[in-house]
């Protein structure tokens, strides 16, 4: 086969006994390289290439200069988690049911629940999360915790700048998750 | 009648003027070189829809300072099985040859008793070829003495490239030499008062530029370097400022080749305006040619080794010979 295809010879399907002519698909090939025609074509293609690159130069850069400008994210972008409070009462939505921890495929959520004391309620339910930690160095941002939560207490935010020099800083506590992110990530507008 | 341009120096200048001229040429060229590296990187970036370096200093103009600072602070590493003296000589020879070639680039004619060129050699073009070929000794010695297979392959490729292109390059310039009747670059520029040689010698110009890409080891003929397959070829084992001087030479050679091309085909310092603008015109023409160098680099991929040989021997050499023949006949007839 390689001898028949190589060396510039055209492939003859009749030479191969087990191939019927219906099996052979003719492939359109470019003109033979070399010769005066080849040089002429190469020159033309070079000019075409030069035209293409010049057009790119005139169009100008498309770079988003990252630390200064941020790429806008879609509204459903799954970034850093947020824990929520009720806006009217200020009580935490999380009741410490640990469903998010159960749903988490990366096993990065740790919840320790405690009973609410009637005079000093923390959450709206019977219990609250005494400890709520997400290890963001293990989190895969799948959003299963958000789906599993029966009270919409945890949602995925838009924050994606979480790099740190120390792994222990990436274990986010309840206070950090309840707080608003320092910098807002730009959102894509409708239809963008 | 055709006067034989033997060793007839047109006039002799005072020594201090010669020294001053050398210093100025040095200062200007070594001021341009770093800017050239930034401009190239920025232009390549823009050709690819991006900005290029823009972090160090305003518009990234201090990038070369940062680069040189980095290169100088690096260790001058030498492989254990390298031939030490030749290894050190490798990057030095191209620098010397590049600086020597700068001397004949004409920036203007004699003004107020001072020739605006390093030196007006009666053998101008031959000098350029002689000096330019020395640079290849540097590449060859550097590649061989590194004691590495990539370096050796890169060096052998430069040798093959040299013999494929130097002939066509010489023949391409021969047409201009015949039309102007002189080898001196100053006389050649003077002969272009009516029409630039790029018009009657268009073929020669194209061949010279193609061979120039090969001479300066630029894409599409950057075979000796071939960063993808040969990890920078003859430069593989070099580091620090030795590597830096190879890079420096590459840009210096671009400057020299575009200077020669501007002088021989684009009318050198010829341009409208008073006499003191002459060096500016020369610089503008050189910069235009340098832009072409960068444009080509942003456009064309590297040729395969055999394609390069085919182009050199089967296309450029016959074309250049034909060009010389036709020019010779026309010069004799008219």
Image (tube, rainbow, N blue to C red):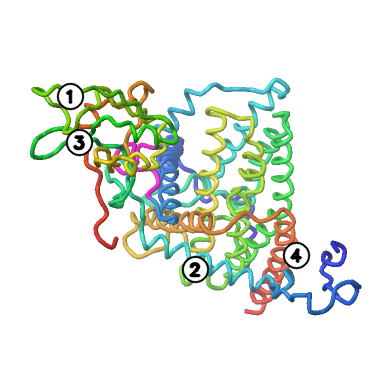
Q: How far separated are the C-alphas under marks 4 and 1? A: 90 Å
Disc 4 with disc 1 on a shared chain: no
Residue under label 3: A93
Instruction: In this rendered view, identify the residue nearer to me: B13 or B117.
Output: B117
Q: Is residue B212 left or right of residue B190?
A: right
Q: Earlier in the sequence, mark 4 or mark 2?
A: 2
Q: Select label 4 or label 1 by which is in front.
A: 1
Q: Select label 4 or label 3 by which is in front.
A: 3
Instruction: In this rendered view, identify the residue nearer to me: A118 or B59.
Output: A118
Q: Chain of mark 4?
A: B
Q: Residue A31 appears at what percent x and percent y?
A: 71, 74
Q: Callout 2: helix, strand or loop? A: loop
Q: Select label 3 or label 2 by which is in front.
A: 3
Q: Earlier in the sequence, mark 1 or mark 3?
A: 3
Q: Which residues are magenta?
A: B51-63
Callout 1 crowding tier (Cα within 10 Å): few <14, some 14–19, many ≥20: some
Instruction: In this rendered view, identify the residue nearer to me: A155 or A16.
Output: A155
Q: Callout 1: helix, strand or loop? A: loop
**Mark 3 and mark 4 in contact (Cβ < 8 Å)?**
no
Q: Select label 1 or label 3 by which is in front.
A: 1
The quarter in which the C terminus of chain B is drawn is: bottom right
Callout 2 crowding tier (Cα within 10 Å): few <14, some 14–19, many ≥20: some
The part of the image, by quadrant, that contains residue B183 is bottom right
Q: How far separated are the C-alphas under marks 3 and 2? A: 82 Å
Q: Is residue A41 above or below residue B128?
A: below
Q: Callout 4: helix, strand or loop? A: helix
**On residue B196, which mark appears?**
2
Q: Chain of mark 1?
A: A
Q: Is residue A50 above or below residue B249?
A: below
Q: Chain of mark 2?
A: B
Residue under label 4: B314
**On residue A116, which mark appears?**
1
């Amino acid at each position: 086969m390689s001898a028949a295809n190589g060396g510039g010879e055209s492939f003859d399907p009749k030479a191969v006994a087990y191939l019927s002519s219906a099996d052979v698909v003719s492939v359109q090939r470019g003109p033979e390289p070399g010769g005066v025609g080849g040089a002429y074509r190469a020159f033309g293609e070079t000019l075409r290439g030069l035209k293409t690159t010049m057009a790119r130069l005139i169009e100008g850069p498309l770079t988003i200069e990252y630390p200064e400008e941020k790429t806008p994210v879609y509204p459903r972008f799954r970034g850093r988690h947020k824990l929520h409070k009720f806006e009217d009462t200020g009580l935490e939505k999380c009741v410490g049911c640990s469903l998010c921890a159960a749903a988490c495929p990366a096993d990065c959520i740790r919840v320790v629940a405690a009973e609410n004391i009637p005079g000093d309620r923390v959450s709206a339910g019977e219990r609250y999360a005494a400890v709520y930690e997400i290890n963001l160095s293990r989190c895969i941002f799948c959003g299963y915790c958000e789906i599993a939560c029966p009270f919409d207490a945890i949602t995925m935010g838009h924050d994606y700048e979480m790099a740190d020099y120390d792994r222990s800083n990436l274990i986010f506590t309840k206070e950090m998750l309840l707080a608003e992110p320092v910098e807002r990530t730009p959102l894509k507008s409708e239809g963008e | 009648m055709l006067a034989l341009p033997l060793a007839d120096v047109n006039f002799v200048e005072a020594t201090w003027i010669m020294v001053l001229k050398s210093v100025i040429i040095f200062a200007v060229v070594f001021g341009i070189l770093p800017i050239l590296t930034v401009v190239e990187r920025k232009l390549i970036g823009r050709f690819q829809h991006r900005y290029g370096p823009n972090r160090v200093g305003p518009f990234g103009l201090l990038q070369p300072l940062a680069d040189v600072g980095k290169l100088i602070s690096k260790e001058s590493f030498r492989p254990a099985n390298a031939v030490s003296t030749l290894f050190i000589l490798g990057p030095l020879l191209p620098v010397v040859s590049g600086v020597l070639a700068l001397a004949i680039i004409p920036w203007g004619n004699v003004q107020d008793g001072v020739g605006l060129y390093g030196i007006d050699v009666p053998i101008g073009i031959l000098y350029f070829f002689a000096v330019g070929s020395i640079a290849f000794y540097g590449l060859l010695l550097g590649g061989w003495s590194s004691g590495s297979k990539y370096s050796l392959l890169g060096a052998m490729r430069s040798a093959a490239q040299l013999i494929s292109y130097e002939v066509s390059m010489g023949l391409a310039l021969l047409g201009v030499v015949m039309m102007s009747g002189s080898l001196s670059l100053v006389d050649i520029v003077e002969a272009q008062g009516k029409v630039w040689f790029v018009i009657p010698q268009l073929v020669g110009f194209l061949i010279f530029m193609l061979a120039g890409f090969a001479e300066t080891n630029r894409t599409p003929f950057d075979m000796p370097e071939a960063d993808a397959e040969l990890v920078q070829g003859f430069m593989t084992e070099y580091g620090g400022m030795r590597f830096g001087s190879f890079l420096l030479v590459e840009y210096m050679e671009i400057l020299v080749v575009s200077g020669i091309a501007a002088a021989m085909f684009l009318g050198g310092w010829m341009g409208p305006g008073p006499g003191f603008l002459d060096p500016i015109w020369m610089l503008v023409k050189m910069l235009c040619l340098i832009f072409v160098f960068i444009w080509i680099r942003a456009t064309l991929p590297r040729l395969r080794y055999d394609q390069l040989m085919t182009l050199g021997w089967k296309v450029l050499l016959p074309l250049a010979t034909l060009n010389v023949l036709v020019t010779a006949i026309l010069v004799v007839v008219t």
